[in-house]
């Protein structure tokens, strides 16, 4: 009857099962069969990732980027915007709605619509409506199969959009894989909503005979000693990945049962530990990064360790060993469980070091879109020490910043639960920060401009100018009403009301503006003083307002003095300059101090690099 023809609805197939059970293999076999039978079928694939598990619409960004023909990892530029607009106009024709909600999923930059902004729920509904319309239009031109792999790592917004697609796009065939077994109530809910079958393929362990066949195939032998077969079956429980890894362990041990590891983790570690130091180092870096790991990232994390040819050779060697596979634009582990094992056996110092290097690489990228969730994760892991004394304060503040951005994106997508989790992590990090008497947080402000101190000075100059003007207006109104109303009430004079209400609102507005900008830049004392002024104005407290304005002026003057000192001093605040921008002019005064910092950093780098290169690292653990 054809794919998705008239009067026919296509089902959702959910392939479920534990890690290592073979979901990816079954999916690949299925896609091969479908491609042979349906030549015109367009397959749009996406995969969830652990590190992106709270990023709104992460797999759908891959799906729709593929649909319009752009790279899912692209940062929004004029080129990506134009490419997406052309593709959307071609697909949608006269129904093309240039809504700003599309910015949440595609690398486009449509301006905000006039009028009141949509709240998070209406924004989510509008986005689902447009995306479903786009899928339906595309399906009219050629049949579409959506493949969502590793949905156990997908956020709530992605699951909600999946349900919308299943309801509103009946001609779209959807296949998902997940480690989590879909409960009967979940299946029944989908069946009730979409009114067509939901097929769940719950994969089971291999039978003993099939498991032994897989072991023999891996060993390239027709015969297998019964004692070895018994041990392998006892330790693999018929899980295909376990069978393969233990078969390799049998081969590496020469068939000596006493040398076989007792767990799948041991089998994987035994295999990794037999590698030479260089490929082992590459695996450790990729284990921390995740998917789509480009050679340029690895080269940046361990500079001068590999030539370009050597690094490419190591990557291809690991592909030949069936440990890595080629991803969209780079490399990743063939199986997530192997990645988890390698990452789990890195030492604390190694993980912290690698997260720091990876985060530094990502913030320097100019042509790739790295989500705030990824940056927050890397900065957070790089910031934490074994105890509070080892906290990297500047890095911790950058993690807080990116967590706030990630929470804002989740709120915009109506992913309230995900946003709350980001904010909880943010609060936890803020509790770790030491208290400071400085009127200005240099590192926090520097993090807002990705280390560009010249841009930071421009931002500060504008901030001081705007705040000074706001403070002048507040002081003028406060002085006027102090003279007009000696009894301490804003409304004591007969006939007054409307004008003073307007002036009162002006005080609140100007104070709130100062507080918001100061908080963003890390000027906590000034922000708190401005909030106190706003509260006094809100309570009609003239006497209290006068005192609060005096405190606000003092905090503002302290900040101005601090900023002038920072700008005029060649070295600036010690704690800020320790994290100077990599493009800073080395000829500037203060070079000796930064040189010392640099030497210490290089020494730490060499120590950790040597530790990661040791052959016996995993065995020692």
Image (cartoon, rainbow, N blue to C red):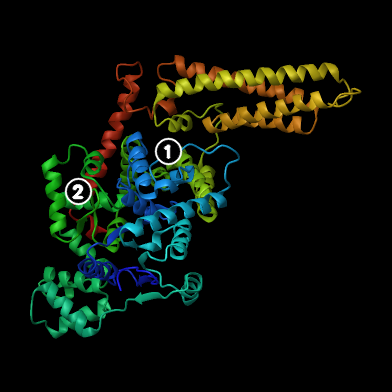
- Residue 117 pos. (x, y %): 58, 42
107 up-or-down from 327: above or below: above
* Viewer-closest of 118 and 203: 118
The quarter of the image holding the N terminus is: bottom left
263 up-or-down from 441: above or below: below
Q: Is residue 492 shown left or right of residue 266?
A: right
* Residue linked to disc 1: 109
Q: In which quarter of the image is residue 581?
A: top left
* Viewer-closest of 143 and 81: 143
Comes first in the chain, label 2 or label 1: 1
Element marked by disc 1: loop
User: Closer to us: mark 2 or mark 1?
Assistant: 1
Q: Residue furthest top?
A: 568
Residue 369 appears anywhere in the view: no
- Residue 203 pos. (x, y %): 32, 76
Numbered badge on residue 613:
2
Q: Which residue is located at x 47 percent, y 70 percent? A: 194
Q: Residue furthest right?
A: 494
Element marked by disc 2: loop
User: What distance separates the C-alpha of mark 2 from that of mark 1?
Assistant: 45 Å
């Amino acid at each position: 009857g054809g794919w998705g023809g008239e009067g026919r609805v296509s089902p959702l197939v959910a392939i479920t099962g534990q890690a290592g059970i073979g979901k990816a293999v079954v999916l690949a076999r299925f896609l091969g069969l479908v491609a042979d039978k349906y030549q015109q079928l367009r397959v749009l694939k996406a995969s969830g990732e652990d590190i992106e598990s709270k990023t709104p619409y992460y797999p759908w960004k891959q799906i729709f980027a593929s649909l319009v023909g752009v790279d899912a990892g692209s940062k929004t530029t004029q080129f990506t915007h134009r490419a997406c607009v052309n593709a959307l106009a071609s697909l949608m024709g006269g129904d093309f709605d240039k809504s700003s909600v599309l910015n949440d999923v595609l690398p486009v930059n449509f301006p905000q619509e006039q009028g009141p902004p949509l709240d998070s729920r209406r924004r989510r509904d509008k986005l689902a409506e447009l995306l479903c319309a786009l899928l339906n239009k595309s399906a009219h031109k050629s049949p579409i199969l959506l493949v969502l792999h590793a949905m156990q790592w997908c956020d709530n917004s992605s699951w909600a959009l999946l349900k919308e697609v299943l309801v509103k796009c009946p001609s779209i065939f959807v296949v998902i894989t997940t480690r989590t077994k879909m409960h009967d109530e979940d299946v029944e809910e989908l069946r009730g909503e979409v009114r067509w079958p939901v097929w769940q393929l719950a994969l089971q362990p291999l039978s003993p005979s099939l498991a032994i066949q897989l072991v023999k195939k891996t060993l390239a032998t027709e015969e297998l000693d019964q004692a070895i077969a018994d041990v392998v079956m006892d330790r693999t429980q018929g899980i295909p990945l376990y069978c393969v890894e233990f078969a390799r362990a049998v081969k590496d041990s020469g068939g000596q049962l006493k040398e076989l590891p007792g767990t799948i983790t041991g089998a994987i570690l035994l295999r990794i530990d037999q590698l030479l130091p260089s490929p082992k180092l590459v695996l450790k870096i990729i284990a921390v990064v995740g998917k789509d790991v480009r050679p340029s990232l690895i080269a940046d994390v361990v500079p001068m360790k590999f030539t370009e040819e050597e690094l490419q050779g190591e990557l291809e060697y690991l592909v030949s060993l069936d440990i890595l596979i080629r991803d969209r634009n780079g490399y990743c582990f063939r199986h997530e469980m192997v990645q988890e094992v390698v990452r789990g056996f890195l030492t604390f110092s190694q993980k912290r070091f690698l997260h720091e290097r990876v985060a530094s690489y990502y913030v320097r990228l100019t042509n790739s879109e790295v989500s705030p969730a990824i940056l927050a994760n890397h900065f957070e892991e790089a910031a934490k020490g074994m105890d509070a004394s080892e906290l990297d304060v500047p890095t911790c503040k950058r993690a807080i910043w990116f967590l706030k951005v990630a929470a804002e994106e989740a709120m915009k997508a109506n992913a309230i639960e995900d946003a709350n989790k980001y904010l909880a992590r943010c609060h936890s990090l803020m509790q770790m920060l030491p208290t400071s008497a400085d009127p200005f947080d240099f590192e926090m402000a520097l993090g807002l401009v990705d280390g560009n101190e010249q841009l930071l000075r421009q931002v500060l100059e504008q901030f001081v100018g705007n705040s000074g003007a706001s403070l002048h207006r507040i002081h003028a109104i406060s002085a006027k009403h102090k003279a007009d109303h000696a009894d301490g009430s804003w409304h004591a004079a007969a006939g007054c009301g409307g004008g003073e209400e307007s002036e009162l609102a002006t005080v609140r507005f100007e104070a709130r503006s100062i507080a918001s900008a100061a908080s963003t830049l890390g000027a906590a004392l000034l922000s708190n003083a401005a909030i106190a002024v706003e509260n006094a104005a809100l309570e009609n407290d003239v006497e209290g307002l006068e005192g609060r304005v005096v405190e606000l002026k003092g905090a503002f003057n302290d900040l101005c003095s601090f900023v002038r000192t920072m700008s005029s001093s060649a070295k600036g605040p010690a704690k800020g300059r320790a994290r100077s921008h990599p493009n800073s002019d080395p000829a500037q005064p203060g070079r000796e101090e930064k040189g010392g910092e640099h030497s210490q950093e290089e020494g730490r780098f060499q120590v950790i690099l040597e530790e990661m290169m040791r052959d016996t690292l995993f065995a020692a653990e």
